[in-house]
Image (cartoon, rainbow, N blue to C red):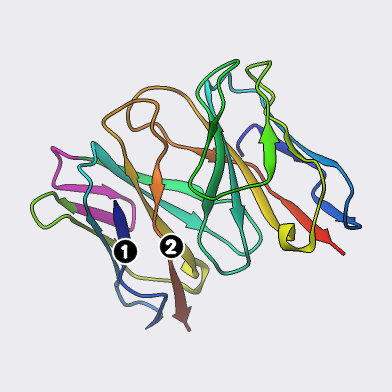
């Protein structure tokens, strides 16, 4: 069965450093991959999309890479701030239009001032 | 802010009661989803719909049912609530086509005594 893993449950980094979160998957060929941010008690919020034919996408301090050979996506937050503390979820997008997204368990990021 | 609404936001009920969690979106999205999520834990897909009169069960076995009579409305019903149903329920929607972001509602926090 398909499996999606995010590198660790929790990641603590110092303010100003770059946070790197990993999303690995098996038994799946996604057409795209998305990253979401979730704050406690709230629903996830979409951040970035990267398609299977793209290597890298950027948005302000965020950068996502996608390696379909390694079956891995990396999510970077540069110049991290305490306000970036949240849980980050990756989601695999299907080639078939009606199949739901497959969400990872998430990585809880804490940025320490 | 996403135009997807859930009511009630919080609900405390006794065992055996029938409840309906409401979800509405004003974005005209064809695809809608229900997820169950315990605090600090992963999202579990329990039901989804890719259009009016279509409903599918998700990955998590659930004793709930859904209906999709109108595009904008996707209610979730528990015929007989149990303490094991205590959780947060998140509704989401997205429009068809690859890569489109998924919008989540604010969630309903359900407690069954």
Q: Is residue B38 left or right of residue A65?
A: right
Q: Residue A80 carries which label?
A: none
Mark 2 element type: loop
- Find out whether residue B57 is within the magenta segment: no
Asked if disc 2 and disc 1 are in contact, CB closer than 8 Å, the reply is yes
Question: Considering the image in quadrants, where does the C terminus of chain B appear?
Answer: bottom right
Q: Residue A5 carries which label?
A: 1
- Find out whether residue A57 is within the magenta segment: yes
Mark 2 is surrounded, within 10 Å at the Cα level, by few (under 14), some (14 to 19) or many (20 or more) other residues, namely: many
Pointer 1 chain: A
Label tally? 2
Q: Which residue is drawn at 67% across and 50% down?
A: B89
Q: Which of A88 and B85 is in front in this view?
A: B85
Q: Nearer the viewer, residue A67 or B81?
A: B81
Pointer 2 chain: A
The stretch in magenta equals: A52-65
Q: Residue at x 74, y 61 (%)?
A: B86
Q: Position of residue B1 (x, y in %)?
A: 61, 39
Mark 1 is surrounded, within 10 Å at the Cα level, by few (under 14), some (14 to 19) or many (20 or more) other residues, namely: some
Q: Do labels 2 and 1 share a chain?
A: yes
Q: Where is residue A65 in the image (x, y as percent from the top left)?
A: 19, 54
Q: Which residue is drawn at 29% across and 52% down?
A: A1
Lower position in the chain sequence, tag 2 or tag 1 = 1
Q: Residue A105 carries which label?
A: 2
Mark 1 element type: strand
Q: Position of residue B22 (x, y in %)?
A: 76, 35
Q: How far apart are marks 2 and 1 (CA)?
A: 7 Å
């Amino acid at each position: 069965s398909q499996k999606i893993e995010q590198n660790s449950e929790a990641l603590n980094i110092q303010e100003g450093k770059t946070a790197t979160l990993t999303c690995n998957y098996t038994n799946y060929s996604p057409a795209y991959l998305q990253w979401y941010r979730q704050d406690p008690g709230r629903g996830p919020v979409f951040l970035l999309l990267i398609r299977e034919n793209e290597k890298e996408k950027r948005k302000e301090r965020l950068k996502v890479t996608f390696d379909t050979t390694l079956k891995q996506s990396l999510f970077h937050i540069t110049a991290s701030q305490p306000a970036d503390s949240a849980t980050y979820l990756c989601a695999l997008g299907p080639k078939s239009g009606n199949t739901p997204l497959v969400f990872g368990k998430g990585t809880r990021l804490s940025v320490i001032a | 802010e996403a135009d997807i609404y859930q009511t009630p936001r919080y609900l405390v009920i006794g065992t055996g009661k029938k409840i309906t969690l409401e979800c509405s979106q004003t974005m005209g999205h064809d695809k809608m989803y229900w997820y169950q999520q315990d605090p600090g834990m992963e999202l579990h897909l329990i039901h989804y719909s890719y259009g009016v009169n279509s409903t599918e069960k998700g990955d998590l076995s659930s004793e709930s049912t859904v209906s999709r009579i109108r595009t904008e409305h996707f209610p979730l019903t528990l015929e007989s609530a149990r303490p094991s149903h205590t959780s947060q329920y998140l509704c989401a929607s997205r429009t068809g086509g690859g890569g489109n972001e998924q919008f989540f509602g604010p969630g309903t926090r359900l407690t069954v005594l």
